[in-house]
C-alpha cells in the first residue's frame, strides 16, 4: 500500500491547485461557447453536431492516452495532454482576433481549436484519474478525488463566471479567453515542475514499449460503461441545449445560474465523495440518479427564473454523486499495470457512445422543447438498474476471481 500512496500529499496538492486553476480559467469563457457559435451564425442544429464532434475527439484520445500512461508513466501523458489542451484554446483566440470580420472562418477555426482541446483533455484524462487515485489514501479515495476534482475547483468560478458573463455581454470575449489561456499556461508549468510519477516502473517492466496492456471487456466493465454511457448521452446532449433553452435574452441570468450551481457543486461533491466511500457504489448511484431524473423532469416546468435557478442547482448537485465511481471501481478491481488502459477504454467507450447525445437531443427537439429532459430522466433510471446488476454480490465475486486468474 505504500506504493499506492507515493507522492502524498504532494500530488494531491498539485492536482488540487491545477484543477482549481483550470476550472477558474475556463469559467471565464468556455461555458459561453454555445452562444459564441450562435453569434457567428451557426444554427442550433449544427451546434449540436459540433458538440458531437467534440465527444468523438475526446473519446479517441482517451484510448491512446490510457495505454500510453501504462507504458510511459502518468506524468508524461498528463503534460502532453495539457499542452495540447492549451494550444487548442490558443487556436480559438487566434480565430477571434484575426478573423473577427469573417464569421464563417471564425466559426470554422474556433471549432477546430475546440476539438483540439478535447483531444488534449481526453489524452490526459485516464492518466490524471489514475495518478490521483494512486496518490490518495485508500480509505479516503472517494473523498480525496472529489475534493481535488470538484470541491476546490468549484469555488472560484462562482465569482469568475460572473466576470466572464460581464465580459461576454460587453463584447470582450477575447479578453476573457486571453486571461483563461494565461491560467492554463500556469497550470502546465505547475504540472511539469511539481508532479511526481506514480507508475514510472512501467517503463522498465515493459521491455517492448510497442506493446501495451490489452484490457479485457468483462461483465462488470461492460455494465459500467453501459450505465455511464446512458448518463453521458443525456448529459452531453443537454450541456449545449440548456443555455439555448434559457435564452440569449437571459444570458446574464444564465451566468448567475452557473455561478450559484458551482457553489452547490462544491458542497455536493464534498458530501458525495464521502458518501460513496461509506455506503458504496450501488446505494449512492441508486439514490443520486433517481432523484436526478425527477429533478430533470421538473426543470422545464419552472415558470419563474428563481424556480429554474433552484431546479438547476439541485440538478448540478445530484450530478456529482457518480463522479468518483468509475476511477474508484477500476482502481479497486484491476492491477496497477492495466488501470490507465482500462480507464482509457472506459472513457473512450462512454465518450463514443455519448457522442450521439447532442445529435439525439437535436432530433428530440423536433418532438417538443421539453422532450430532451424526459429523455435524460429515462436514461438515468435505466442506468440505475444496470448499476444494481453490475454490483450484485455474485457478479462482483465472479469477476474479481476471473480478473485475478488472468492477471
Image (cartoon, rainbow, N blue to C red):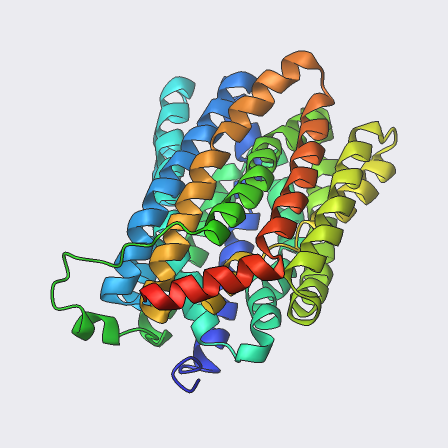
Which residue is outermost to the bottom?
2
Instruction: Quadrant for the C terminus, please.
Output: bottom left
Q: Residue at x 63, y 34 (%)?
A: 169
Q: Position of residue 332 (x, y in %)?
A: 49, 68
The answer to whether residue 143 shows anywhere in this view is yes
The answer to whether residue 36 shows anywhere in this view is no
Q: In the figure, 184 relative to 103: above or below? A: below
Of 288 and 36, nearer the camera is 288
Q: Quadrant of residue 170?
A: top right
Q: Position of residue 27 (x, y in %)?
A: 57, 49
Q: Is residue 382 left or right of residue 350?
A: right
Q: Is residue 217 left or right of residue 16?
A: left
Q: Residue at x 47, y 60 (%)?
A: 399
Q: Is residue 361 left or right of residue 63?
A: right
User: Total of numbered circles in the picture?
Assistant: 0
Q: Position of residue 136 (x, y in %)?
A: 50, 76
Instruction: Quadrant for the N terminus, please.
Output: bottom left
Q: Residue at x 44, y 80 (%)?
A: 10
Q: Position of residue 92 (x, y in %)?
A: 39, 37
Amino acid at each position: 500500500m505504500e506504493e499506492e500512496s507515493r507522492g502524498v500529499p504532494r500530488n494531491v496538492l498539485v492536482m488540487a491547485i491545477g484543477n482549481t486553476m483550470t476550472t477558474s480559467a475556463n469559467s471565464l469563457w468556455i461555458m459561453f461557447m454555445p452562444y459564441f457559435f450562435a453569434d457567428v451564425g451557426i444554427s442550433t442544429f449544427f451546434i449540436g453536431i459540433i458538440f458531437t464532434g467534440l465527444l468523438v475527439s475526446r473519446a479517441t484520445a482517451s484510448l491512446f492516452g490510457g495505454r500510453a500512461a501504462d507504458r510511459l508513466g502518468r506524468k508524461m501523458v498528463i503534460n502532453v495532454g495539457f499542452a495540447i489542451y492549451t494550444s487548442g484554446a490558443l487556436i480559438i483566440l487566434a480565430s477571434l482576433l484575426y478573423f473577427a470580420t469573417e464569421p464563417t472562418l471564425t466559426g470554422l477555426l474556433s471549432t477546430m481549436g475546440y476539438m483540439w482541446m478535447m483531444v488534449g483533455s481526453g489524452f490526459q484524462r485516464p492518466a490524471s484519474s489514475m495518478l490521483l487515485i494512486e496518490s490518495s489514501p485508500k480509505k479516503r479515495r472517494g473523498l480525496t478525488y472529489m475534493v481535488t476534482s470538484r470541491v476546490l475547483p468549484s469555488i472560484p468560478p462562482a465569482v469568475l463566471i460572473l466576470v466572464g458573463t460581464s465580459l461576454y455581454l460587453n463584447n470582450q470575449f477575447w479578453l476573457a479567453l486571453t486571461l483563461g489561456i494565461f491560467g492554463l499556461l500556469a497550470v502546465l508549468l505547475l504540472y511539469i515542475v511539481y508532479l511526481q510519477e506514480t507508475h514510472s516502473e512501467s517503463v522498465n517492466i515493459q521491455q517492448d514499449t510497442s506493446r501495451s496492456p490489452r484490457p479485457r471487456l468483462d461483465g462488470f466493465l461492460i455494465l459500467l460503461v453501459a450505465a455511464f454511457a446512458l448518463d453521458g448521452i443525456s448529459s452531453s446532449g443537454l450541456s449545449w441545449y440548456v443555455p439555448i433553452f434559457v435564452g440569449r435574452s437571459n444570458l446574464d441570468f444564465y451566468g448567475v445560474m452557473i455561478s450559484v450551481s458551482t457553489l452547490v457543486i462544491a458542497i455536493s461533491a464534498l458530501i458525495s465523495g464521502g458518501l460513496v466511500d461509506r455506503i458504496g457504489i450501488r446505494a449512492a448511484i441508486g439514490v443520486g440518479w433517481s432523484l436526478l431524473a425527477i429533478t430533470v423532469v421538473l426543470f422545464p416546468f419552472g415558470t419563474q427564473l428563481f424556480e429554474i435557478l433552484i431546479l438547476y442547482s439541485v440538478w448540478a448537485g445530484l450530478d456529482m454523486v457518480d463522479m468518483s465511481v468509475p476511477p474508484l471501481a477500476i482502481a479497486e478491481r484491476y492491477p496497477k499495470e492495466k488501470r490507465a488502459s482500462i480507464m482509457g477504454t472506459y472513457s473512450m467507450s462512454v465518450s463514443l457512445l455519448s457522442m450521439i447525445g447532442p445529435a439525439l437531443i437535436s432530433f428530440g427537439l423536433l418532438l417538443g422543447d421539453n422532450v430532451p429532459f424526459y429523455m435524460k430522466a429515462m436514461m438515468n433510471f435505466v442506468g440505475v438498474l444496470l448499476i444494481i446488476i453490475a454490483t450484485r454480490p455474485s457478479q462482483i465475486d465472479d469477476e474479481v476471481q476471473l480478473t485475478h486468474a488472468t492477471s
